[in-house]
Image (spheres, grey):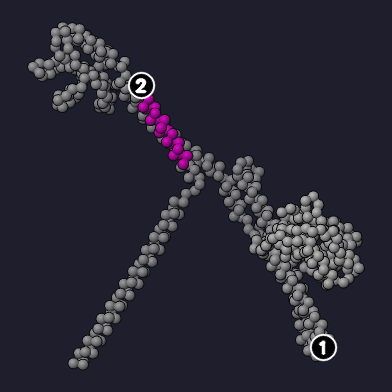
């Protein structure tokens, strides 16, 4: 009994395993098939998109050929309809003047004037059928027609007749107009007159006109498509040349420009705009390369100094206290220089990217100038720091950034002014503008260097800069800060006499 229980349990486990395995196989097979189908559908859709990705030349040609075809078809239909109205329209009363004469002859005669009817029908190209009523039945009395009179058969079979009705039917590729009239002669005999007019010449003319218009339209559409394709290619050739030129432009070939001499339309404006964009890209790329080169050079100097003093410490500084102190001071100084340089680089990077925060508010610019002068006097005892004309003036701007800019100007004046010289800060109003002036009697700036002093890493006097230190980025930061406050900077300087910087803040 136990053996059967164990066998049954094993069998249940096997069945459960097989069921679970089957379910998993089914699920994974379904997912795999779905993956293949999705991939196949995506590939097919992409192939269809690629197949129907027509060129601009093809699209322009098709659109204008389609519009031209519609115009040609519309004009052809109008010509055919006008020809029909002029030549075949049965409602034109002039066509039925001979039939009116026949009816008048029957009404005014005792007997049917067959001779007169024959003459009229012969010259007017009319087919005439006259039915006379005998014992409530209409029987043929006169019949002149090359064909069986289908109109009368229709009248008799349908049991009705419409009097004075004009009908136009197609009869063996010809147009035929019919008129049915009932008239009574003088002897009170009722006649039914069916007059039919075949438009043989007119039908032939319309048929030939349709054939001619079809041939001319087809030829015109074909020619317009071919000519339109060539004209489109010719018109779009400058775009193709522009595409080839743009594909040749790379980082190493930014000097390549689009040719603007061969076009005098909107493409010329596009080429000029694109060339201007390339000019800006080239200038920015050159500035970026110069910036990276200068930054690398500026970082190389403190790193070399740090490496040199590290080697010095490794050799003799462990036992020589004087070498140890000198190395520590140098390492501290160079690390501070590196920190200042990195902070300035980060500031300029944020400003270029547009992520530098500017928090503007109304503050006292007079108090800010007093604060800067007071702090500078505590740090520098070798120069006379003066504050003049410090009127009570407020400014709407970022106080922290304005203080940073003014301090950079003051620090530069201290660096390039000999001991016992003066640095003068003035604040006053001029023509509704707030003017902040920083003046010194230092070494001055050569005239040819003034336009470049706000460029990054630019130094007017390389030898002097080595003595005073600095990275050449301070004035670039000042220019960005003042531009954010819509301020204007003017620099006046004479070598060996001094420099005066005027900052004009507009009204809020």
Query: Could you tell me if residue 456 is visible in this image?
Result: no
Dot placed on the residue nearer the N-terminal end, 2 or 1? 2
Dot 1 lies on which element? helix
User: What residue is rendered at 20% in x and 7% in y?
Assistant: 108
Q: Is 426 placed left or right of 171 in the picture?
A: right
Label disc, if present, on residue 321 of the rendered structure: 1
User: What residue is rendered at 80% in x and 88% in y?
Assistant: 316
Q: Is 481 placed left or right of 139 in the picture?
A: right
Against 242, residue 84 (above or below) is: above
- In reply to whether residue 71 is colored magenta, the answer given is yes
Label disc, if present, on residue 86 of the rendered structure: 2
Choose between 286 and 348: the one closer to the eye: 348
Q: Quadrant of the C terminus?
A: bottom right
User: What residue is rendered at 26% in x and 27% in y?
Assistant: 170
At label 1, counting other C-alpha atoms closer than 10 Å, the crowd grade (few under 14, some 14-19, many 20 or more) is few
Magenta stretch? 63-83
User: What residue is rendered at 33% in x and 27% in y?
Assistant: 207
- In reply to whether residue 392 is colored magenta, the answer given is no
Q: Quadrant of the N terminus?
A: bottom left
Q: Is 294 placed left or right of 221 in the picture?
A: right
């Amino acid at each position: 009994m136990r053996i059967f229980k164990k066998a049954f349990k094993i069998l249940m486990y096997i069945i459960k395993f097989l069921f679970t395995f089957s379910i998993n196989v089914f699920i994974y097979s379904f997912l795999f098939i779905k993956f293949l189908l999705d991939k196949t559908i995506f590939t097919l859709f992409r192939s269809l998109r690629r197949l129907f990705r027509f060129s601009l030349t093809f699209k322009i040609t098709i659109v204008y050929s389609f519009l031209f075809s519609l115009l040609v078809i519309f004009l052809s239909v109008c010509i055919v309809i006008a020809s029909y109205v002029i030549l075949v329209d049965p409602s034109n009363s002039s066509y039925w003047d001979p039939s009116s004469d026949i009816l008048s002859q029957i009404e005014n005669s005792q007997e049917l004037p067959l001779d007169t009817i024959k003459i009229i029908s012969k010259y007017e190209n009319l087919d005439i059928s006259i039915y006379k009523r005998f014992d409530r039945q209409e029987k043929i009395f006169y019949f002149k027609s090359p064909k069986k009179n289908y109109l009368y058969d229709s009248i008799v079979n349908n049991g009705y007749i419409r009097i004075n009705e004009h009908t136009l039917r197609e009869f063996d590729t010809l147009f035929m107009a019919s008129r049915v009239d009932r008239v009574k002669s003088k002897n009170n005999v009722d006649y039914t007159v069916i007059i039919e007019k075949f438009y043989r010449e007119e039908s032939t003319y319309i048929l030939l006109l349709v054939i001619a218009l079809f041939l001319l339209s087809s030829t015109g559409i074909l020619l317009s498509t071919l000519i339109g394709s060539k004209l489109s290619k010719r018109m779009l050739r400058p775009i193709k040349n522009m595409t080839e030129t743009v594909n040749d432009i790379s980082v190493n070939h930014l000097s390549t420009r689009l040719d603007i001499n061969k076009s005098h339309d909107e493409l010329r404006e596009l080429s000029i705009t694109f060339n201007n964009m390339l000019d800006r890209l080239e200038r920015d790329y050159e500035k970026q390369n110069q910036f990276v080169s200068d930054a690398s050079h500026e970082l190389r100097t403190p790193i070399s100094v740090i490496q040199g003093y590290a080697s010095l410490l490794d050799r003799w500084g462990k036992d020589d206290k004087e070498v140890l102190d000198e190395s520590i001071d140098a390492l501290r100084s160079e690390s501070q220089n590196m920190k200042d340089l990195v902070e300035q680089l980060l500031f300029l990077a944020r400003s270029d990217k547009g992520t530098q925060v500017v928090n503007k508010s109304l503050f006292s610019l007079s108090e800010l100038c007093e604060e800067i002068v007071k702090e500078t006097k505590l740090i520098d005892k070798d120069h006379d720091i003066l504050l003049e004309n410090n009127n009570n003036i407020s400014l709407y701007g970022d106080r922290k950034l304005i203080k940073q800019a003014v301090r950079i100007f003051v620090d530069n004046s201290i660096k390039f002014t000999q001991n016992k010289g003066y640095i003068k800060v003035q604040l006053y109003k001029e023509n509704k503008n707030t003017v902040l002036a920083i003046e010194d009697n230092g070494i001055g700036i050569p005239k040819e260097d003034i336009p470049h002093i706000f460029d990054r890493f630019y130094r007017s006097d390389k030898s002097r800069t080595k003595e005073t230190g600095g990275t050449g980025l301070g004035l670039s930061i000042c220019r960005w800060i003042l531009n954010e406050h819509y301020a204007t900077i003017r620099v006046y300087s004479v070598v060996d006499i001094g420099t005066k910087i005027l900052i004009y803040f507009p009204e809020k």
